Amino acid sequence: TLDPHSFPTRRSSDLFAAKGYKVALASRSLKEADSTTDQVNISSDFSDPESIITTFSKVKSLLGPPSVVVYNGKLTSGT
């Protein structure tokens, strides 16, 4: 599961797909209707722990158990 808005992550997803991996991308801004045969888009917000569980359940049901997970989170400060 990869964040599609990060250039390194986007490149990583392309590399994994080129090697034959099934790719799922997760982000708040993704539209699941925009999924393709090569890429599953999952709308999710990982600041909500329940969303993480739901996302992994979707990946498992659509693609099987993931063999590689890349998490590209953004750290923010409250100050």
Image (cartoon, rainbow, N blue to C red):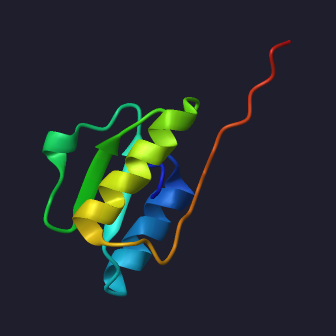
Which quadrant does the C terminus fall into? Answer: top right
Residue 8: image x %, image y %?
Answer: 55, 60
Q: Classify residue 65 as left or right of residue 79.
A: left
Q: Classify residue 35 as left or right of residue 28.
A: left
Query: Is residue 33 shown to the viewer in this render?
Result: yes
**What residue appears at the point 14 percent right and 42 percent down from the top-left corner?**
33
In terms of depth relative to the viewer, which is nearer, 67 or 7?
67
Residue 16: image x %, image y %?
Answer: 41, 77
Q: Classify residue 9 as left or right of residue 55.
A: right
**What residue appears at the point 51 percent right and 74 percent down from the top-left corner?**
68
Residue 22: image x %, image y %?
Answer: 31, 74
Residue 2 to residue 26: above or below: below
In terms of depth relative to the viewer, which is nearer, 28 or 57?
57
Q: Residue furthest right?
A: 79
**What residue appears at the point 42 percent right and 54 percent down from the top-left corner?**
56
Residue 9 to residue 3: above or below: below
